[in-house]
């Protein structure tokens, strides 16, 4: 008998298993589970966007597009950045349309990393970053952040982890899982740091539209001197509620985009054309619906924040994305114990904070991209759970 | 205020405690605001959208285009009032275009509605003609899709 495990690549072995798999299986088996564990909008894609895709199919948009994506779509992306952030990206050579931000991050890392190159990754962070760095042959270097500082990362934090092998900094604000956003001053601190150590900055701004309380998102490449060294990621999954369409994009200088396109053309060819057609409609006419959704997230954000404060769990007010990241240290349980017990006793699914990095231990991630009734119900159950431990 | 109204329009039963949290305001402020909106009749009533069909009632609804001869001084208002005072009449709107009043009537049967139109509505002085249309099926009512098949299809946990 062949031992197929033996046959696997060493790189795959290096990738840690998912931190949520085992809870997932338990959660699916319950029929009355309330889940705050979903990292995607509860809205269905707005109808006008879906309708445009149907129309596109009727007109026969079923073939490959150019590798970098349909030019009208890239043009709309450029227009969007011009309008929202007053920054110019040339649609012909500085934008590539990808299969979600997921692919874009992978392409960027593969395009820039040599074996052993180190990438600084402030944690807690989105689960894919570390894995993608490993798969690209690089070495992820987690930079822990703390709740006392609302999980903001500073140049001083990063400095402790810089080595001659450090090649890039990978950040994601507004942040999944913490909801943290950085101020312009803080971002400038990171920009100066990147300049000083000549790092490429990979900035995942997929939640950029989802900021609250009048706080405006700052696009990293608009900071002085940063456009040239930044690979910017954004997509349609969150702001337009289009997760299943698999559509995202990266923007950077032509050298990076060309290198990414080289990989993309052989591994993906192009992003789904049906989704690209819908993406054009989303960018042209999707703003109103997007703001409606953002407004609803904001109301739910207040509700869930107030709920956790009332329970006495140490939490800070999230300013972006649709997650809140309360501390459960006072319960004496680890994140995983908490999640397991909560699921078992009260049938509420949340994600253990350590799934997003070691420093997420002692926290849970709750998504408020779910209906107000479900949030209120989940809060009641969590409160009940805390009373009985 | 607008946000509060939108929330109530969507779900009038949402507890004040939740409304206050969602709008980031103290509860007493929400209570006072609702009271004032009610007093000013901006909030006119709290209704429930019921699927009577599903409950087993098979009422018929008729949309009637009514032409009227407007009257001196009161225009359409007096005739409109004579119409909307009937219990059978659910809604009355003054319209631009090829007819004047849009009247929506609900009754237990086709006969009853037809009878109402023939005996009550068209005999009102000033009503010059009527055209009735019977509704066959409701797909969406007051913003609510009747048979919405868009369930939450997301997985229970995703990163
Ligand atoms: C921070 C972050 N980046 C990227 C992604 C993946 O996005 P996409 O659907 O565009 O691949 C997610 C999805 O959860 C995310 O939270």
Image (tube, coloured by chain):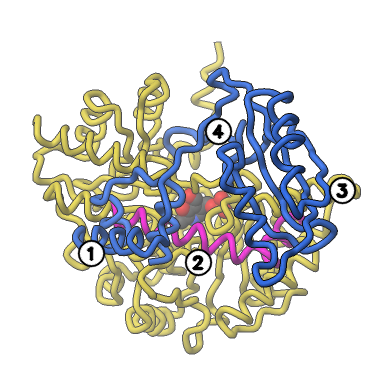
Chain colours: A yellow, B blue
Residue at x 74% of width, y 51% of height:
B125
Disc 3 target residue: A63
Closer to us: A334 or A269: A334
Number of other residues with Cα within 10 Å of mark 1, as a class: few under 14, some 14 to 19, many 20 or more:
few
Of the two numbered discs 3 and 2 on the same chain, state the one appearing first in sequence. 3
Q: Position of residue A49 (x, y in %)?
A: 70, 53
Residue at mark 2 to residue at mark 1: CA–CA distance: 30 Å
- Which quarter of the figure has residue B72? bottom right
Q: Which residue is mark 4?
A: B151
Q: Chain of mark 2?
A: A
Residue drawn at (63%, 22%), measured in percent from left and top? B58
Return the chain for callout 1. B
Mark 3 to mark 1 CA distance (whole Å): 57 Å
**Disc 2 and disc 4: Cα gap in Å?**
26 Å
User: Residue tagged by mark 2?
Assistant: A209
Q: Secondary structure at mark 4?
A: loop
Relative vertical location of residue B96 with respect to residue B8 in this rendering, above or below: below
Is the CB of the residue bearing disc 2 within 8 angstroms of ligand 1? Answer: no
Q: Residues within 10 Å of mark 4 (few under 14, many from 20)?
A: few
- On whether disc 3 and disc 2 are found on a single subunit, the reply is yes
Quadrant of the image containing the N terminus of chain A: top right
The magenta-colored residue range is A277-303
Q: Earlier in the sequence, mark 4 or mark 1?
A: 1
- Between disc 3 and disc 2, the foreground one is 2
Chain letter of the residue beneath label 3 in the structure image: A
Residue tagged 1: B29
């Amino acid at each position: 008998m062949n031992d197929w495990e033996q046959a696997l690549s060493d790189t795959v072995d290096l990738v840690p298993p998912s931190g949520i798999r085992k809870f997932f299986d338990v959660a699916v088996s319950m029929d009355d589970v309330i889940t705050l564990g979903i990292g995607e909008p509860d809205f269905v894609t707005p109808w006008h966007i879906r309708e445009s895709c149907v129309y596109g199919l009727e007109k026969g948009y079923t073939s490959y597009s150019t590798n970098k994506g349909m030019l009208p779509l890239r043009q709309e992306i450029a227009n969007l950045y011009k309008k929202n952030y007053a920054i110019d990206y040339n649609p012909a050579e500085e934008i590539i349309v990808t299969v979600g931000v997921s692919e874009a991050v992978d392409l960027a890392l593969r395009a820039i990393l040599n074996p052993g190159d180190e990438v600084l990754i402030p944690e807690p962070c989105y689960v894919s970053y570390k894995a993608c760095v490993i798969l690209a042959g690089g070495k992820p270097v987690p930079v822990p952040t703390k709740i006392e500082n609302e999980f903001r990362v500073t140049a001083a934090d990063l400095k402790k982890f810089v080595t001659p092998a450090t090649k890039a900094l990978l950040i994601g604000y507004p942040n999944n899982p913490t909801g943290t956003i950085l101020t312009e001053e803080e971002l400038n601190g990171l920009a100066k740091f990147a300049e000083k150590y000549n790092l490429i900055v990979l900035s995942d701004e997929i939640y950029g539209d989802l900021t609250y309380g009048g706080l405006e998102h700052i696009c990293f490449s608009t900071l002085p001197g940063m456009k040239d060294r930044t690979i910017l990621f954004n997509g349609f999954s969150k702001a337009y509620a289009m997760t299943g369409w698999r559509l995202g994009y990266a923007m950077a200088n032509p050298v990076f985009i060309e290198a990414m396109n080289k990989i993309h053309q052989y591994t993906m060819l192009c992003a789904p054309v049906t989704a690209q057609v819908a993406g054009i409609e989303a960018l042209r006419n999707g703003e109103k619906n997007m703001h409606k959704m953002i407004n609803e997230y904001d109301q739910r954000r207040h509700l869930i924040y107030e709920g956790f404060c009332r329970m006495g769990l140490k939490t800070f007010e999230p300013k972006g994305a649709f997650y809140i990241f309360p501390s459960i240290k006072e319960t004496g349980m680890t994140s995983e114990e908490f999640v397991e017990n909560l699921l078992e006793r009260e049938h509420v699914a949340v994600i253990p904070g350590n799934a997003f990095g070691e420093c997420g231990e002692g926290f849970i991630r709750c998504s408020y991209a779910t209906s107000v009734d479900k949030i209120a119900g989940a809060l009641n159950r969590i409160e009940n759970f805390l009373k009985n431990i | 205020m607008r946000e509060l109204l939108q929330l109530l329009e969507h779900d009038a039963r949402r507890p004040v405690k939740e409304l206050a949290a969602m709008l980031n305001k103290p509860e007493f402020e929400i209570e006072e605001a609702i009271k004032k909106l009610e007093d000013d009749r901006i909030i006119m009533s709290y209704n429930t959208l019921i699927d009577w069909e599903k409950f087993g009632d098979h009422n018929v609804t008729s949309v009637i285009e009514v032409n009227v001869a407007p009257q001196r001084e009161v225009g359409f208002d007096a005739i409109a009032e004579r119409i909307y005072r009937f219990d059978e009449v659910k809604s009355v709107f003054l319209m631009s275009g090829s007819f004047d009043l849009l009247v929506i009537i609900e009754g237990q049967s086709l006969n009853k509605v037809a009878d109402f139109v023939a005996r009550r509505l068209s005999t009102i002085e000033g009503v010059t003609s009527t055209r009735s249309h019977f509704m066959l099926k409701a797909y969406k009512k007051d913003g609510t899709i009747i048979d919405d098949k868009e369930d939450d299809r997301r997985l229970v946990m995703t990163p």
